[in-house]
C-alpha cells in the first residue's frame, strides 16, 4: 500500500524594500511565533530604489497588466513606490539592522537576497562580471557585518540569474540557493558548465501573482486555491511588503487553513540538508527562463516543462 505524500511547506520570505523590512518583518515574526513556524528570510541590504521599477512598464512584458490587476500601489504602499525617484533611496541594511538581528534571534533562517534589488532584477544581463561580483559581495559583506557570520544561502532578486551570476555565486561557500521557480531541487547547469551548489526552487505561485489572476476575485477564492495547492513538499515565497503588511490578514488565514489541514512547516536549510543526504540522486538541470501567470517579465527555471 502506497503511503500518501507528506504535505509540507518551506516558507521563503523575500524582503525587497525598506518599508517591508522595517514594518513587515516584525509583523511576520509575531505571526510565525504565534503559529510555531520557523521560516527562511532573505534580506536586501543596499538602496531601496523601488520607484525606479515603474520603468518595467516599458521593458517587461505583462508588467503593467500585473500591476493593475494586483493593485500594486495599494499592495506596496507609499512611500515605497517613490523611493529612488521623488524620494531618496534609503539604505536598507543600515536602517534595518535591528529587524534583521531580531529575525535571527527568533530562530529563523536568514540569507542574502540583494544589494540593489531593482538594479539586479532589471539590469543583470547588461552588467559585466565585475559589476555582478561587486553587487553580490556587497550584500554578503553587509550580511556578515549585521549578523556576525557568513551567509550560507542566497536567493536572487526576481528569480533573475544568468551564467555570469551563477559563476560568481559559485565562488561563495553556500549550502544552497533559491534562485528559480518550479520543480524539485537540482544542481544548475548553464553554458555547458555544471554548478555544485544545490538549487531549491519556489514551487507555489506567489500571492502577488495570484492576486492578478482574474479567476481568483476574493480572499475566499485565494484561500481555496492555496488550501488545494500543497500536495507534497512545497516552497512558498512570500514578500515582507505584501504578506507582512497589506495582506497579512489573508496570509494569516492561509496559514491557519494549512495548519488545520495537517500541513507541517520546515526551513529551506532543513530541506536542503535533507535533500543532500541523497546527493547522487539529485538531477542536473539547465537553467533557462520562462513566464508565469500573473508575473511581469521572465523568471529562471530548471523545469520549463
Image: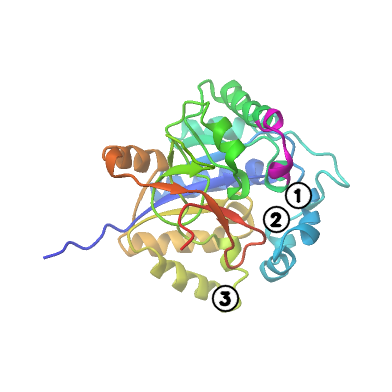
Q: Which residue is mark 1?
A: 80
Residue 282 position, x and y percent, is: 33, 44
Is any part of residue 118 visible from this angle?
yes
Looking at the rendered image, the quarter that the N terminus falls into is: bottom left
Q: Secondary structure at mark 1?
A: helix
Packing grade of label 2 (10 A; few <14, some 14-19, many >=20) is: many
Packing grade of label 1 (10 A; few <14, some 14-19, many >=20) is: many
Indicate whether residue 128 is drawn in magenta: yes
For marks 3 and 2 on the same chain, the one whose residue lies earlier in the sequence = 2
The reply, left or right, for residue 195 in relation to residue 290 is left
Q: Which residue is mark 2?
A: 76
Q: Are marks 2 and 1 in contact (CB under 8 Å)?
A: yes
Real-space Cα distance between discs 2 and 1? 7 Å
Q: Residue 26 sits in which quadrant?
A: top right
Is any part of residue 79 visible from this angle?
no
Region rendered in magenta: 123-132
Q: Secondary structure at mark 3?
A: loop
Amino acid at each position: 500500500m502506497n503511503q500518501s505524500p507528506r504535505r509540507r511547506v518551506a516558507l521563503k520570505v523575500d524582503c525587497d524594500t525598506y518599508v517591508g523590512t522595517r514594518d513587515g518583518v516584525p509583523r511576520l515574526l509575531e505571526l510565525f511565533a504565534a503559529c510555531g513556524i520557523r521560516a527562511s528570510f532573505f534580506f536586501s541590504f543596499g538602496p531601496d530604489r523601488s520607484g525606479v521599477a515603474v520603468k518595467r512598464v516599458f521593458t517587461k512584458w505583462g508588467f503593467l497588466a500585473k500591476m493593475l490587476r494586483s493593485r500594486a500601489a495599494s499592495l506596496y504602499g507609499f512611500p515605497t513606490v517613490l523611493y529612488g525617484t521623488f524620494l531618496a533611496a534609503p539604505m536598507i541594511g543600515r536602517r534595518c539592522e535591528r529587524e534583521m538581528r531580531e529575525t535571527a534571534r527568533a530562530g529563523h533562517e536568514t540569507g542574502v537576497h540583494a544589494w540593489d534589488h531593482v538594479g539586479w532584477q532589471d539590469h543583470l544581463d547588461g552588467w559585466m562580471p565585475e559589476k555582478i561580483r561587486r553587487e553580490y559581495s556587497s550584500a554578503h559583506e553587509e550580511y556578515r557585518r549585521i549578523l556576525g557570520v557568513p551567509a550560507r544561502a542566497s536567493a536572487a532578486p526576481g528569480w533573475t540569474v544568468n551564467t555570469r551570476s551563477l559563476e560568481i555565486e559559485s565562488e561563495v561557500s553556500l549550502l544552497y540557493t533559491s534562485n528559480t521557480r518550479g520543480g524539485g531541487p537540482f544542481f544548475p547547469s548553464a553554458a555547458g558548465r555544471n554548478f555544485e551548489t544545490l538549487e531549491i526552487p519556489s514551487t507555489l505561485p506567489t500571492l502577488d501573482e495570484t492576486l492578478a489572476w482574474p479567476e481568483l476575485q476574493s480572499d475566499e477564492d485565494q484561500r481555496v486555491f492555496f488550501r488545494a495547492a500543497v500536495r507534497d513538499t512545497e516552497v512558498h515565497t512570500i514578500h515582507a511588503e505584501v504578506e507582512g503588511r497589506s495582506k497579512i490578514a489573508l496570509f494569516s488565514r492561509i496559514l491557519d487553513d494549512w495548519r488545520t489541514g495537517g500541513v507541517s512547516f520546515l526551513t529551506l536549510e532543513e530541506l536542503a540538508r535533507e535533500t543532500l543526504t541523497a546527493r547522487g540522486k539529485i538531477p542536473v538541470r539547465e537553467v533557462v527562463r520562462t513566464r508565469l501567470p500573473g508575473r511581469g517579465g521572465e523568471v529562471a527555471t530548471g523545469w520549463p516543462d
